[in-house]
Amino acid sequence: MLLVMLGMAVGTGNIWRFPRIAATNGGGTFLIPWAIFLLAWSVPLLLVEFAMGKASRRGPVGAFATLIGGSWAWMGAWIALCATFIMFYYSVVTGWCLRYLAATVTGEIPGSEPGALWESYAGSGWAVLTMAVSLGLGVWVVAGGIRGIERAARVMMPTLLVLVVILAIRAVTLPGAERGLAFLFTPDFSALGNSRVWLEALTQNAWDTGAGWGLALTYATYMRAREDTTVNAFVLGFGNNSISLLAGIMVLCTVFSIRPDAAGEIVGAGNTGLTFIWVPQLFAAMPAGRIFMALFFLALLFAALTSLISMIELATRVLVDRGVARGKAIAWVAVAGFAMGVPSALSMPFFENQDNVWGVGLLLSGLFFALAVLRFGVDRFRQRFINSAGSDVVIGRWWNAAIWLVTIEAVVLLAWWFSQTLSEQGLAASLDPFASWSLGTILLQFAIALGLCLAFNRRLGRLAGGPEPGSGERR
Amino acid sequence: MSAAAWITMALVCGYIWGGLLLLVSIAMRKERFKDASPAQPWEP
């Protein structure tokens, strides 16, 4: 189960997002809030998710309704909606990884023109096709049930770990790699006063670990009664961030070793620019580069696919909890996933907009988990669901404080970021609802999603039936 | 690399990777203990 959980948590965010976000937010300075938020955000929320899933044996909507009452089902619905909207464009990302792995094998990349393949592929019908294939692969694994997901994770996760370690060792042994290490680890303390650095560190932690997505909750519904939650939650958080750190070292050492002259341009080229335009050029300049490039895209594909599987399972689980037969639920998720993924496959501005909006949405998801615990009673929750039978380590009162801290962090960071965006961009620009990254587009889409959740709250609150929380039912 | 970069690297890597090693060792020790122990009463 831990491998399945790690598969959920380790995604493309670790390999392509972390190095870029760390590099563009002060390197060593960014690592300070990133390390703090692991214990001040990710691990406390993972503990909540593990405990809620194991106790309620339901997906996010059912778990919230069971724990704090049917009138609060809208909070679980928001969490499910946020993760599902991420799934819609995440299948596009998985498709890109698949296409680039194929292009490496066939020798299409690296071409003579940097980015030529990306220019002709991104936003084309081929991107829709690879998205459909990736979604089909994910749906096929989920159709095999939790056993199928476990089998896939048992193959993909150890392979991914070995590939990342091989690539990191290769990167740090390249001549001039220490420039990459210096770039990643040199702190710039003046950047700590910027709200964007803290927001990015928190959203990166949320992205990295999957804390607050509802994915860990969904998988925890399948945990055995004797299976530990506490140590697993800690291992998941630290294991996931360990891979991020390795990926950061791997990417930045490679960039600064091969192209120190263009390092600033490369790390500033965005997720897709860095991975799909520059990475092929970097590996091409390395001895046996094609082999390492194939290993890189294979690792990226496995990371993306294991995370996509967890998102498909979450959406399926929500429907199953509503009484829909599992086969039919998977079919609905597949059809919706394809229909809603097409716009992101065909339009990069739309893709970037969705990435930004639902990335910030995870902050609200985390807040809702913390609010649910506060409503239930923090101490009662800890004693009844976290320090339950089967728990290897007893969690003390520090966790009560951590849940209050998560609530304060989410509110303060959102308010700080809102005010800084307004003062930097001005009212008109920051409220533009059609920009890929603006307050306006985020608020508009959040309002629609929250409105839908509240409108269907009464219907969502009616449960499909099941055990009482904490009954320790086995799968 | 500057001294500040070395110190940051040691602290961050020690915290993340050291923490992981410690947790994995705890998890493995607890699992071994569990295997040797009699089944818990609430287990079917």
Image (spheres, grey):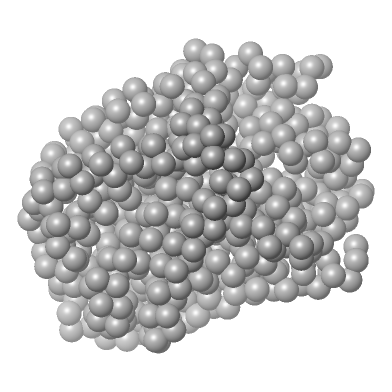
Residue at 7% x, 55% y: name it. A465
Specify whether residue A133 is in view: no
The answer to whether residue A84 is left or right of residue A323 is: right
- Give the answer, above or below, for where A355 lies relative to A419: above
Question: Quadrant of the rendered structure where residue A82 is?
Answer: top left
For the point 69% across and 63% down, which residue is it? Answer: A192
Q: Quadrant of the N terminus of chain A?
A: bottom left
Count of marks placed on residues? 0
Return the x and y of residue A174 as percentages of the image width and height: 87, 48
Q: Nearer the viewer, residue A191 or B32?
A: A191
Relative image position of residue A146 (x, y in whole percent) = 30, 49
Identify whether A91 is placed above or below A49. above
Identify the image quadrant of residue A239.
bottom right
> Which residue is found at the position 19% from the left and 54% from the top?
A73
Camera sees residue A334 = yes
Q: Provide residue B43's location: percent of width, then percent of height.
A: 19, 76
A47 on left or right of A458: right
Compared across the picture, whether A396 is left or right of A208 comes to: left
- Where does the image place residue A246, in percent across and percent down from the top left? 68, 56
Residue drawn at x 61%, y 29% as measured from the top left: A101
Q: Quadrant of the C terminus of chain A?
A: bottom left
